[in-house]
Image (cartoon, rainbow, N blue to C red):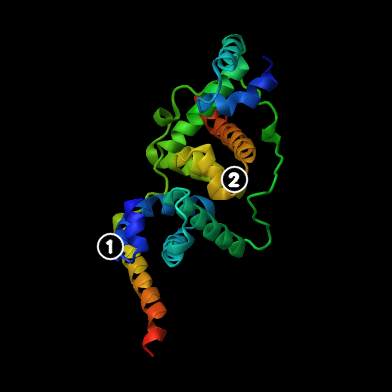
């Protein structure tokens, strides 16, 4: 918090240190939400600039990082809406899919996916799979499971209730799991459908 | 514990947020229900694989450009704010 206080007093080197500390995280979150590199670059710049301009309003009741994530998520969703105006993009959307029911599985992922695919193939699968999630689910998953925010911090950053975060997280995890299974079980079953 | 109850508790279980009693009931269920065991195991792997994936890392050259752009915009913002007082 000392860096934040110094930045609030007008010490730009302290703010620069905050940028260095969190820019990678903000970029990852922004690219996960927007799925577009240029948008993610813009979100990083706009989020930090907004944080800089509004530092006086930051009350220090939450972590600076949680506050910054909230700004970045809002910027990213705004850009996503601009890019896809035909589709409403909201964190509140409730999307029912076939993946929501109790999954039926017989085969585990064995050997591990990391052993089945090279790094580039695996990245491609992971990117395509997470792109298919509704933005509201994707955002919760990224904050909780990729960035490691707590449930409470995620709720604070997204202005959602804790039960809403938990419900979206469960569905995001299950949907990702179900979609990845289509790749990993197919491969594990011996590429029989080639 | 039934399969639907397991599913409701899955997120709390994977996050280590269950009380001892519910955790033990869930693990009893996993011991005999192969379907739920596979769902639990592959969901855990899903989280791990994304956490370790390093998707969207910020390349160093782009990072340098972004940091410079951010700080110069911040300086411009500061000057703009203090500018009218001088006039």
What residue lies at 59% left-to-right and 63% top-to-bottom? Answer: A83
Observer able to see residue A189:
no
The quadrant in which the C terminus of chain A is found is top right
x and y percentages locating residue A33 in the rendered image:
53, 52
Is label 1 in a helix, a strand or a loop?
Answer: helix
Q: Nearer the viewer, residue A13 or A20?
A: A13
x and y percentages locating residue B83 in the rendered image:
38, 83
Instruction: Name which quarter of the figure residue A10 lies in.
Output: bottom left
Find the residue positioned furthest to the bottom. Answer: B87
x and y percentages locating residue A94 in the rendered image:
70, 44
State if disc 2 and disc 1 touch (CB < 8 Å). Answer: no
Is label 2 in a helix, a strand or a loop?
Answer: loop
> How many other residues sit within 10 Å of disc 1, few (<14), some (14-19) or many (≥20)?
few
What residue lies at 64% left-to-right and 24% top-to-bottom? Answer: B7
Is residue B67 shown above or below A99?
below
Is residue A193 shown above or below A37?
above
x and y percentages locating residue B58 in the rendered image:
36, 53
Observer able to see residue A176:
yes
Chain letter of mark 2 equals A
**Residue at image mark 2:** A132
**Residue at image mark 1:** A13
Mark found first going from the N terminus, 1 or 2: 1
Q: Nearer the viewer, residue A150 or B66?
A: A150
> How many other residues sit within 10 Å of disc 2, few (<14), some (14-19) or many (≥20)?
few
Q: Let me know if marks 1 and 2 both belong to one chain.
A: yes
Instruction: Name which quarter of the figure residue A87 lies in.
Output: bottom right
Is residue B58 shown above or below A179?
below
Q: Nearer the viewer, residue A122 or B51?
A: B51
What residue lies at 67% left-to-right and 14% top-to-bottom? Answer: B1
């Amino acid at each position: 918090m000392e860096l934040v206080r110094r930045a609030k007093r007008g010490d730009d080197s302290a703010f620069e240190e905050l940028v260095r500390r969190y820019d990678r995280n903000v970029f990852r979150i922004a690219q996960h939400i927007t799925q577009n590199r240029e948008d993610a670059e813009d979100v990083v710049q706009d989020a930090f600039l907004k944080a800089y301009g509004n530092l006086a309003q930051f009350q220090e009741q939450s972590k600076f990082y949680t506050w910054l994530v909230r700004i970045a998520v809002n910027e990213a969703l705004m850009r996503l809406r601009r890019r896809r105006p035909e589709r409403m993009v909201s964190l509140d959307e409730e999307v029912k899919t076939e993946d929501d029911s109790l999954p039926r599985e017989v085969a585990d992922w064995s050997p591990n996916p990391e052993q089945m695919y090279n790094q580039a193939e695996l990245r491609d699968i992971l990117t395509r799979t997470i792109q298919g999630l509704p933005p509201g689910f994707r955002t919760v998953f990224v904050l909780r499971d990729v960035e490691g925010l707590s449930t409470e911090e995620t709720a604070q950053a997204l202005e959602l209730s804790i039960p809403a975060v938990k419900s979206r997280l469960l569905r995001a995890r299950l949907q990702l799991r179900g979609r990845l299974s289509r790749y990993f079980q197919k491969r594990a079953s011996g590429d029989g459908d080639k | 514990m039934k399969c639907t109850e397991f599913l409701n508790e899955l997120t709390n279980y994977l996050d280590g947020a269950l009380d001892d009693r519910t955790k033990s009931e869930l693990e009893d269920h996993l011991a005999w229900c192969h379907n739920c065991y596979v769902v639990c195991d592959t969901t855990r792997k899903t989280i791990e694989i994304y956490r370790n994936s390093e998707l969207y890392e910020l390349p160093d050259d782009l990072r340098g450009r972004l940091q410079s752009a951010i700080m110069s915009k911040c300086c411009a913002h500061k000057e703009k704010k203090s500018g009218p007082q001088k006039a």
